Amino acid sequence: MRIIDAHNHPDWHGKEFTRFIQDMDEKNIEKCWLLSWECPRNEYHADTVKVVPADMLGTTTGPIPFARCVSYAERAPERFILGHAPDPRDPDACNKLIAAHDIYNVKICGELKYRVMYDNFDCLRLFRTAGMLKMPVVMHFDYDRTTTVGAPRAEWYGGTIDTLERVLQACPETTFIGHAPGFWSHISDDDLYMRGGYPAEGTPVIAPGRITQLLRKYPNLYCDLSANSGLMALKRDKVHALEFLTEFQDRIVYARDNFTNNHQEFLNSLGLPETVLSKLYHENAESLIAD
């Protein structure tokens, strides 16, 4: 079966170009959405130094510059589909997105991972530009769970699940793809989203969670299964995972944000029909990007 990885990054977790291609071949991945992440140095955690090249750190286009995505695509254009999300606070953000589309054939606005509320005016302007260009927007959400006064600030991105709903309402012409702990923790109607960490396997999902409610209400919302957040949202409750993947089989894309095969192994263990797996593995991703 054809497989598209709808979320990964160049030079990520020690995988430079040659090893990246080798990993794709080993995991039977035909193509990859290659996304930038260009937030300022003061907006990402020091642990990021462990998973990106040192010379990218502290730059204005780090930790994952769009130029690195372009470099990969130039060497293997048949394997990579480009994504780029300029910092929405940049006065030139919309024009940069248009230029990336026109010059480099960028098809995804992503990864949007900035310490800013995604429903502010600058973000909404960028999202409407992406909608005009028929680009889906990959959004990283994370909560600040710091409760101790004076403690080092945590990584937070995007706002809350309510922020996401306001964005969906404000930009119905734009497709959004939810990702990361601040999104996937809302698969269940509980308070784990503010307690941190990933729920263990066997932690029941209390349905319907906010993700399910938003998917039913807003046709412009999709889900990205990548990273531990997406995987554990499914693995915590296998019965619910089957129901969720079946109901929203047209709105979910297979993605990794790492170089394991854990997502494939779990999806393949569920006994899903071939027609559903085909949608998750490549059909939905293909439907989201313009020709």
Image (tube, rainbow, N blue to C red):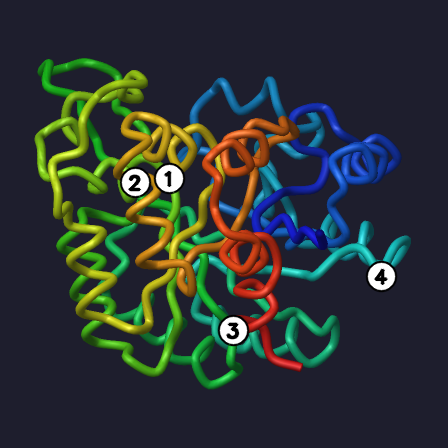
Residue 260, compared with residue 132, is above or below; it is above
Depth check: give the residue in front, 15 or 118: 15
Check if mark 4's residue and mark 2's residue have beta carbons within 8 Å. no
Q: For label 1, count other residues whose C-alpha is less than 10 Å away and answer few (under 14), some (14-19) or many (20+).
A: many
C-alpha separation, residue under disc 3 versus residue under disc 2: 22 Å
Looking at the rendered structure, the kind of residue marked 2 is Trp
C-alpha separation, residue under disc 3 versus residue under disc 4: 19 Å
Classify residue 78 as left or right of residue 246: right
C-alpha separation, residue under disc 4 versus residue under disc 2: 31 Å
Q: Which element is circle 2 on? A: helix
C-alpha separation, residue under disc 3 versus residue under disc 1: 19 Å
C-alpha separation, residue under disc 1 versus residue under disc 4: 27 Å
Check if mark 3's residue and mark 2's residue have beta carbons within 8 Å. no
Q: Which residue has dot 1 on it?
A: 180
What number is the disc on residue 77? 4
Q: For label 4, count other residues whose C-alpha is less than 10 Å away and answer few (under 14), some (14-19) or many (20+).
A: few
Q: Which element is circle 4 on? A: loop
Check if mark 2's residue and mark 1's residue have beta carbons within 8 Å. yes
The tag earlier along the polypeptide, 4 or 2, is 4
The image quarter in which residue 104 lies: bottom right
Q: Which residue has dot 2 on it?
A: 184
Q: Which residue has dot 3 on it?
A: 135
Depth check: give the residue in front, 185 or 123: 185
Residue at the spot x=28%, y=80% of the render?
A: 172
Q: Which element is circle 1 on? A: loop
Looking at the rendered structure, the kind of residue marked 4 is Pro
The tag earlier along the polypeptide, 1 or 4, is 4
Classify residue 124 as left or right of residue 177: left
The tag earlier along the polypeptide, 3 or 2, is 3
